[in-house]
């Protein structure tokens, strides 16, 4: 009976030693899982934005078609990024950048993007998420302890518009 009395609190002490390690592993799995999901969403938003910009845009002149392409790319990428956004809104602008809270979509259309192909206009959609300003999982113990996470997440896609634009 004396042996059992000596072992009475051993399970609680072992739990107190092992629990923080298991909790840190669980926290890391959740944090990096959400970061990978966000990265996949950002890459999908860029490719969907480029795909939307490639669709036929009716306009009399090049500038009108270009602004319609930029607006379509921004609109489509914003629709894909809906779960990542803290602030709603955002749309296309003439400069080619549409920002909504912590996400930014930058659209450029240029003949130099596809420099190996003569006369081809390509469009590039770059989507950026500021992970530093809005982390998906709060840091463990505030600024004292946290996992190494990226400052920003980016996804980009380049698509060929057509041979003669």
Image (cartoon, rainbow, N blue to C red):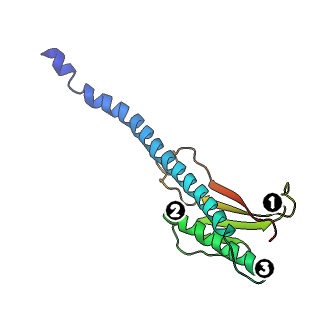
Residue 70, compared with residue 135, is above or below; it is below
The reply, left or right, for residue 135 in relation to residue 59 is: left
Q: Which of the two residues, 74 or 18, is positioned nearer the viewer here? A: 74
Q: Are marks 3 and 2 in contact (CB under 8 Å)?
A: no
Give the Cα distance between marks 3 and 1.
Answer: 18 Å
> To which residue does mark 3 refer?
63
**Which residue is located at x 26 percent, y 25 percent?**
10
Q: How many marks?
A: 3
Locate residue 32 relative to residue 104 in the image: left or right. Answer: left
Query: What percent of the width, then of the height, locates residue 135?
Result: 53, 56
Please give the name of the residue rendered at 36% of the width and 35% of the height, measured from the top-left corner. Answer: 19
Asked whether the beta carbons under mark 3 and mark 1 sit within 8 Å of each other, the answer is no
Q: Quadrant of residue 4?
A: top left
**Callout 3: helix, strand or loop?**
helix
- Report the residue marked by disc 1: 113
Q: Quadrant of the C terminus?
A: bottom right
**Closer to the camera: disc 1 or disc 2?**
1
- The numbered dot on residue 84 is 2
Is disc 1 placed on a helix, strand or loop? loop
Where disc 2 sits, the SS reads loop
Extreme residue toward the right, this view: 118
* Distance of label 3 from label 2 (alpha carbons): 31 Å
Between disc 3 and disc 2, whose residue precedes? 3
In the image: residue 154, left or right of residue 21? right
């Amino acid at each position: 009976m004396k042996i059992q009395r000596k072992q009475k609190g051993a399970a609680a002490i072992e739990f107190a030693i092992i629990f923080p390690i298991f909790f840190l592993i669980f926290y890391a799995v959740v944090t990096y899982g959400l970061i990978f999901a966000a990265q996949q969403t950002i890459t999908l938003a860029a490719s969907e934005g480029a795909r939307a910009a490639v669709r036929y845009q009716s306009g009399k002149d090049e500038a009108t078609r270009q602004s319609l392409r930029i607006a379509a790319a921004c609109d489509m990428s914003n629709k894909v990024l809906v779960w990542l956004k803290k602030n709603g809104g955002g749309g296309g602008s003439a400069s080619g950048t549409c920002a909504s809270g912590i996400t930014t979509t930058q659209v450029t259309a240029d003949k130099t993007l596809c420099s190996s192909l003569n006369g081809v206009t390509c469009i590039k959609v770059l989507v950026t998420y500021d992970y530093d300003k809005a982390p998906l999982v709060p840091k463990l113990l505030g600024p004292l302890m946290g996992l190494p996470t990226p400052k920003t997440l980016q996804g980009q896609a380049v698509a060929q518009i057509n041979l003669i634009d």
